[in-house]
Amino acid sequence: MTAEILEIDVVDRAIIAATQGGLPLVPRPYDAIGDGVGLSGAEVRARMQEMLKSGIIRRIGAVPNHYKLGFSANGMTVWDVADEQISDLGKKVGALEFVSHCYHRPRHAPHWPYNMFAMVHGKNREEVESHAQEIAKILGSAVKGSDIIYSKRILKKTGLRISV
């Protein structure tokens, strides 16, 4: 199976370069980007939608700094969940307001029995532990084990970067 090679024109490349570090913090960010690449804000949005549709870019999303928002206790809750139920349960857990992301990963038995991960944010460890208890109620008898791994520092999350 051969991967399809997608062509990126000079304008799309300039839009990607202008947005890969984040949108400008101004009232009309797409207009500001457009000013830099010679397009209107509407044209920037339309081109980004086409890049999403074609797979050139995968998503546009907010990446909040939880520490600056007052959520200094951040814990990756890990769960050993029945494989046949993980999809349905993961959707329920991922929809909780205190979970920023929830995903399925393979177990690495015998040392790592967990297959569902849910990042939980709270103002303190007690709040995170309370949220983990809420998740446990949702998971019910499908969960065989769990743990919480707390963040000690914020890690810089970046994807692939291109230069113009």
Image: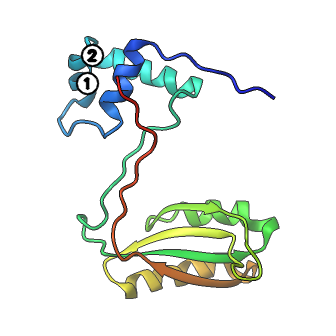
Q: Position of residue 57 (x, y in %)?
A: 50, 31
Q: Position of residue 90 (x, y in %)?
A: 64, 63
Q: Secondary structure at mark 1?
A: helix
Quadrant in which the C terminus appears: top left
> CA gap, disc 1 to disc 2?
7 Å
Q: Which residue is mark 1?
A: 33
Q: Which of the 4 quarters of the picture holds residue 39?
A: top left
Position above or below: 46 against 75? above
**What residue do we see at 68% from left, 22% from top?**
4
Pointer 2 local density, CA inside 10 Å: few below 14, some 14–19, many at least 20: some
Circle 1: residue type: Ile
Q: Which residue, as the protein is rendered here, is positioned at the far front?
A: 163
Q: Which of the 4 quarters of the picture holds residue 88?
A: bottom right
Q: Is residue 133 left or right of residue 140?
A: left
Q: Is residue 16 left or right of residue 101?
A: left
**What residue do we see at 72% from left, 60% from top?**
87
Position above or below: 50 against 95? above
Q: Position of residue 129 (x, y in %)?
A: 46, 85
Q: Which residue is mark 2?
A: 37
**What residue do we see at 63% from left, 21% from top?**
5
- Which disc, if any, is residue 56? none
